Image (cartoon, rainbow, N blue to C red):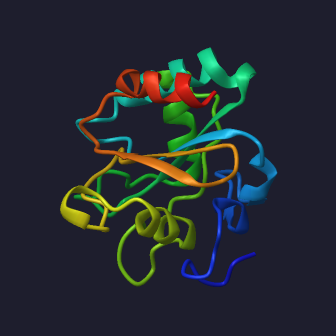
Amino acid sequence: MASSADGASSVYEFEATTIMGLPKPIGDYRGKLLLIVNTASKCGFTPQYGGLQELYETYHDRGLEVLGFPCNQFMNQEPGSNEEIRQFCRVTYGVTFPMFDKINVNGPDAHLLFRYLKNQAPGVLGVKAIKWNFTKFLVDREGHVVARFAPSIEPEKIRPKIEALI
């Protein structure tokens, strides 16, 4: 696994911890189209879980994986434990796509995967920092970041990009 985000050539070089506490190499998703999202349960954008689940259900059989990474860095909008987050997502939005351990996406403790994603696809005006919950990164089947979407972009609006890559 990559020890830094700087020398990596794809997302497949990273590992994350599932919401159930198990290590999961991102390389296990090799050959899949990935939509990687930092999430939160108490945010104005939280209803996007429903749209993400809809994309997952529509395109999973054709190779899309949605990967959710809870983050509590934005106004403490993800205060719960992993189990509370898992239950909330499943019960409230029917989430069945893979969810991961709560992480930081900015700052010195940012998860290496998100450091890589931000470097590969900076935001508006080249800003690398993630501004808020539900920032989305689309990764092609070779593990390369092809697009970054602001939190205000609804999952449904990403459908054309998914269709083009699926």
**Residue that sits furthest to the right in the current view:** 28
Nearer to us in this view, 1 or 18:
1
Instruction: Please state the horizontal and vertical placement of residue 34, each as a whole percent of the image.
Output: 61, 42
Identify the residue shown where x is 61% and y is 52%: 100
**Residue that sits furthest to the front in the current view:** 164
Instruction: Please state the horizontal and vertical placement of residue 149, each as a whole percent of the image.
Output: 34, 43
The C terminus appears in which quarter of the rendering? top right
The image quarter in which residue 31 lies: top right
The N terminus appears in which quarter of the rendering? bottom right
The image quarter in which residue 41 lies: top left
Instruction: Please state the horizontal and vertical placement of residue 125, each as a whole percent of the image.
Output: 18, 62
Left or right relative to 148: residue 127: left
Q: Is residue 155 above or below residue 103?
A: above
Left or right relative to 108: residue 164: right
Q: Is residue 64 visible?
A: yes
Identify the residue shown where x is 51% and y is 33%: 89
* Badge count: 0
Identify the residue shown where x is 28% and y is 42%: 151
Instruction: Please state the horizontal and vertical placement of residue 19, each as a whole percent of the image.
Output: 64, 51
Nearer to us in this view, 33 or 131:
33
